[in-house]
């Protein structure tokens, strides 16, 4: 099928332009390069003035905070931007890029604001946020089984719009409904449909971006190298993603979910051991996440399932392949795919699907997460060691500690590791996420809890991938290597680059050298241009 589309991207970028301008408030705090930047965008695109927030603007703090999800980066010590620019058209994005480049101002691009290290809204050098929240149009074409979605749209909005147009279509991306498509898709993007359809990046057919020269490009004009790089290499190193064209996938009218808890007494260790053997090999219609945590001083393992079909087919499948689960029909809930989204995102039962359109989420907790890949089965003794580690951790912090094991296999094992920059395909049993979160702050508490999750990560080394110890870009972790905000050290970049991208890292640096040789798009973990 040929989805020729270059005509449609301008269509979805049409936005309300307010045709008057305001004088600039004096911002003595900003450096002169920021002043020049602000004058430049005022001159280039007068209507953009309406969408610029400087620290003297009464809405500045509200706009800044509204997309900060992690309270660790909502402290007086967190560096603030010199301005926030929130374009309402692709021309505004162009003006922002060109004026920032010409005046030597660093930009940080923010879509949903969920970056684990806050790199979309904090930097140690003077910077401006290019905030995409006004660019969130979504158009679904069920007949062609495609949709266009702008970078600032959330997954909740996208899921709602797809389901509103069809009850048998979906898109494979994340579980958390507040994620922005700009950051989430360009970093990989996985969810419950991963074993059936792969990642978000495996289902993207075109994109509209603004490059470091301020040009608007689509797949045909950017070329296959850049189009490859932005599907898993992180948008922030290459261009501003303005919109994606995505291929919808088919789902049945009814799907099934379950969530069965096991305590140690109920056989949690056997269930976890067997899960490793079974979950990555199950039918690709099934995605079963294992979620060990500590509750009431003991281990609790939640087995959280998603099935593309009805319980009548599911229960016999699991009775045969995973009898330790003892899954019965009464453990299962059948619902539409959209309702399963609410269920997996932990909305209370009965929440109306319109809740997916609510963008007011705020930051409830402080947290620090890390990731790992497991390639060989962990022995029963190994699992018991992990349980001990979890209880030890829970005993020594005020934080809640949760681990998520996400099974690979299915479609994930069939897609070649070089087809996108995301390299963690065949040979992986599961992705591990370590989650530590707490709600009482203070720098000492933060230091202590962050130290604890690092300790857990160190202790896990025997059980996970080695040379390199792989990590998932969307679970960004500055501990695995980073460079200064204001430049990129190639040797450092090779450290995190090989963990996130393995053998795809060299190609990413070549694409970078081609499209952004002066390294305009950069952050603490960006891709440096290949050294000559
Ligand atoms: C609660 C929660 C649940 C999550 N669940 C999942 C999950 O189920 N599956 C999964 O795969 N991941 C998950 N993640 C991780 C998530 O995918 C990443 O944090 C992702 O980067 C978020 O994208 P964003 O646009 O919301 O974040 P942002 O913080 O806005 O951006 C993240 C990165 O992308 C860059 N970026 C953002 N927009 C653009 C753009 N338009 N153009 C170029 N670069 C851009 C930013 O500069 C930054 O480097 C979860 C994160 C959280 C906090
Ligand atoms: C806008 O551009 C014009 C012409 O280049 C220039 O004379 C003027 O000083 C600029 N104004 C601002 C506010 O930068
Ligand atoms: C860690 O993951 C949890 C669960 O997905 C999430 O709620 C939390 O915000 C994440 N932490 C960070 C630092 O974003
Ligand atoms: C800024 O520098 C401080 C101190 O070196 C460091 O802790 C912090 O992580 C840096 N911030 C970013 C966004 O890199
Ligand atoms: C689609 O959305 C409209 C308005 O939001 C609503 O009235 C309608 O019931 C929805 N249709 C379906 C099939 O969900
Ligand atoms: C912990 O114990 C309390 C009191 O017995 C109980 O109410 C609660 O449900 C338990 N929590 C979990 C997660 O089992
Ligand atoms: C299986 O589940 C049923 C119903 O929930 C329960 O009665 C039975 O004890 C369970 N069997 C095992 C071996 O856990
Ligand atoms: C949106 O969600 C927030 C946080 O859960 C809640 O406080 C608010 O009431 C919700 N808004 C609407 C319109 O439902
Ligand atoms: C954690 O604390 C509980 C009691 O609160 C104790 O029984 C257990 O031995 C401790 N575990 C570790 C690993 O410290
Ligand atoms: C934080 O830790 C430092 C040194 O470890 C200590 O001096 C200080 O009192 C602590 N502050 C609080 C609020 O606990």
Image (spheres, helix red, strand yellow):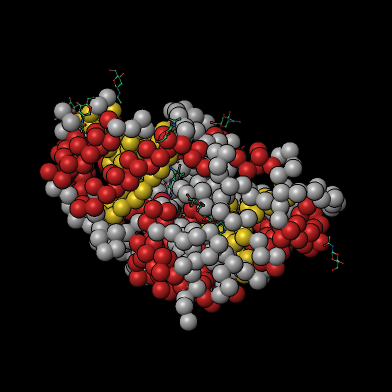
Task: Looking at the picture, tell me which residue is in the foreground, 381 or 418.
Answer: 381
How many marks the image carries: the answer is 0
Q: Position of residue 344 (x, y in %)?
A: 40, 38
Against 223, is 55 above or below? above
Q: Position of residue 186 (x, y in %)?
A: 49, 59
Q: Position of residue 474 (x, y in %)?
A: 43, 53
Quadrant of res 104: bottom right
Q: Residue furthest bottom?
A: 532
Q: Position of residue 311 (x, y in %)?
A: 30, 38
Quadrant of res 271: top left
Which residue sits at x=59%, y=56%?
A: 125
Q: Quadrant of ligand 9?
A: top left
Which residue sits at x=62%, y=60%?
A: 106
Task: Looking at the picture, tell me which residue is in the foreground, 302 or 357.
Answer: 302
Task: Looking at the picture, tell me which residue is in the foreground, 421 or 295.
Answer: 295
Which residue sits at x=59%, y=62%?
A: 240
Task: Looking at the picture, tell me which residue is in the foreground, 530 or 426.
Answer: 530
Left or right: 260 as drawn, with respect to 347: left
Q: Is residue 279 visible?
A: no
Which residue sits at x=37%, y=38%?
A: 448
Left or right: 291 as drawn, with respect to 490: left
Q: Is residue 49 visible?
A: yes
Against 110, is 468 above or below? below
Left or right: 11 as drawn, with respect to 233: right
């Amino acid at each position: 099928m040929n989805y020729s589309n270059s005509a449609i991207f301008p269509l979805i970028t049409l936005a309300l332009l307010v045709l008057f301008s305001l004088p600039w408030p004096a911002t003595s705090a900003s450096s002169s390069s920021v002043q020049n930047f602000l004058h430049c965008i005022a001159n280039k695109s007068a209507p953009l003035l309406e969408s610029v927030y400087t620290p003297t603007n009464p809405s500045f703090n509200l706009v800044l905070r509204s997309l900060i999800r992690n309270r660790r980066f909502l402290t007086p010590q967190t560096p603030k931007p010199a301005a926030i620019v929130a374009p309402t058209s692709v021309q505004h994005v162009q003006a922002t890029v060109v004026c920032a480049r010409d005046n030597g101002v660093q930009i940080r691009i923010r879509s949903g604001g969920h970056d684990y290290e806050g790199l979309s809204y904090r930097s140690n050098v003077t910077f401006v946020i290019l905030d995409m929240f006004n660019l969130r149009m979504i158009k679904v074409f069920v007949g062609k089984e495609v949709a266009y979605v702008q970078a600032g749209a959330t997954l909740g909005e996208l899921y709602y719009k797809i389901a509103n147009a069809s009850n048998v279509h979906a898109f494979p991306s994340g579980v958390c409904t507040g994620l922005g498509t700009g950051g989430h898709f360009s970093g990989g993007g996985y969810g419950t449909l991963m074993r059936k359809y792969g990642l978000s990046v495996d289902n993207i057919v075109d994109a509209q971006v603004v490059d470091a020269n301020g040009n608007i490009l689509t797949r045909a004009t950017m070329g296959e190298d850049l189009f490859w790089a932005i599907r898993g290499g992180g948008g922030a190193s290459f261009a501003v993603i303005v919109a994606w064209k995505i291929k919808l996938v088919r789902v049945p009218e009814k799907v099934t979910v379950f969530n069965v808890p096991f305590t140690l007494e109920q056989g949690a260790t056997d269930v976890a051991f067997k899960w490793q053997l079974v979950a990555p090999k199950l039918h690709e219609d099934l995605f079963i996440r294992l979620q060990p945590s500590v509750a009431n001083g003991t281990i609790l393992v939640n087995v959280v399932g998603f099935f593309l079909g009805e319980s009548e087919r599911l229960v016999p499948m699991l009775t045969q392949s995973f009898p330790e689960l003892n899954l019965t029909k009464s453990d299962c809930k059948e619902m539409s795919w959209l309702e399963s989204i609410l269920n997996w995102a932990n909305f209370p039962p009965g929440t109306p699907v319109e809740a997916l359109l609510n963008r007011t989420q705020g930051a409830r907790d402080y947290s620090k997460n890390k990731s790992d890949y497991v390639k060989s089965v962990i022995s029963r003794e190994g699992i018991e060691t992990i349980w001990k580690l979890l209880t030890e951790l829970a005993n020594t912090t005020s934080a809640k500690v949760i681990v998520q094991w996400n099974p690979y296999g299915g479609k994930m094992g069939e897609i070649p590791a070089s087809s996108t920059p995301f390299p963690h395909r065949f040979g992986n049993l599961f992705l591990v996420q370590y989650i530590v979160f707490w709600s009482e702050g203070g720098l000492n508490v933060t230091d202590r809890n962050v130290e604890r999750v690092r300790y857990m990560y160190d202790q896990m080394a025997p059980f996970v991938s080695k040379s390199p110890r792989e990590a998932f870009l969307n679970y960004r972790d500055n501990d695995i290597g980073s460079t200064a905000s204001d430049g990129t050290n190639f040797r450092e970049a090779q450290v995190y680059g090989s963990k996130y991208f393995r053998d795809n890292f060299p190609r990413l640096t070549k694409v970078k050298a081609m499209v952004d040789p002066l390294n305009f798009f950069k952050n603490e973990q960006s891709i440096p241009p290949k050294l000559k």
